[in-house]
């Protein structure tokens, strides 16, 4: 949910997400694809960069998503 929290602050690139989350690019890309396929995120391409943002509409209904603007608690380090 850290990726979703980060994207709640606005549109950003995969590389910015990788730097923030501290996971590998393939891992972040996998999670972004899963969230996009489920309808939680939207993306747009500009040259070589892909920008991701939170989808404001529910993937199942044409209404505002209940997750929009929700802030999940950050995971605590062990």
Image (cartoon, helix red, strand yellow):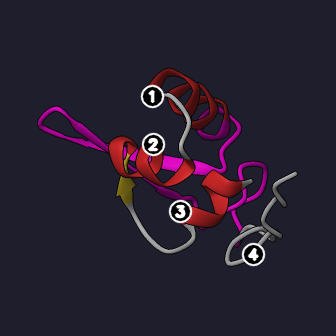
Q: Find the distance from the CA under tag 4 to the CA under tag 1.
A: 23 Å
Instruction: State whether residue 35 is above or below residue 21.
Output: above
Residue 59 belongs to the span the image colors magenta: yes
Mark 2 or 3: in front is 2
* Residue under numbered circle 2: 18
Q: Residue at x 16, y 32 (%)?
A: 48
x and y percent of residue 66 in the render?
A: 81, 71
Q: Are marks 4 and 1 in contact (CB under 8 Å)?
A: no
Q: Which residue is mark 4?
A: 71
Q: Which residues are magenta?
A: 35-64
Question: Of label 1 and label 2, which has the lower sequence position?
Answer: 2
> In the depicted view, which residue is nearer to us: 65 or 72?
72
In primary-sequence order, the first of circles 2 and 3 is: 3
Tell me the tag on residue 7: 3
Q: Position of residue 64 (x, y in %)?
A: 70, 72
Q: CA distance from mark 2 to mark 3?
A: 12 Å
Mark 2 or mark 4, earlier in chain: 2
Residue at 63% from the left image edge and 33% from the top image edge: 31
Foreground mark, 4 or 1, reads: 1
Q: Secondary structure at mark 2?
A: helix
Q: Nearer the viewer, mark 1 or mark 3?
A: 1
Label 2 vs label 4, nearer the camera: 2
Q: Which disc, if any, is residue 25? A: 1
Task: For the residues labelled 1 and 2, say whether their Cβ atoms are less than 8 Å apart.
Answer: yes
Please, what secondary structure does the residue beneath circle 4 have?
loop
């Amino acid at each position: 949910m850290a990726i979703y929290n980060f994207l709640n602050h606005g549109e950003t690139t995969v590389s910015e997400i990788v730097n923030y989350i501290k996971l590998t690019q393939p891992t972040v890309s996998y999670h972004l694809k899963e969230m996009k396929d489920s309808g939680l995120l939207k993306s747009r391409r500009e040259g070589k960069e892909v920008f991701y943002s939170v989808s404001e509409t529910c993937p199942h209904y044409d209404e505002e998503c209940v997750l929009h603007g929700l802030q999940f608690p950050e995971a605590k380090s062990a």
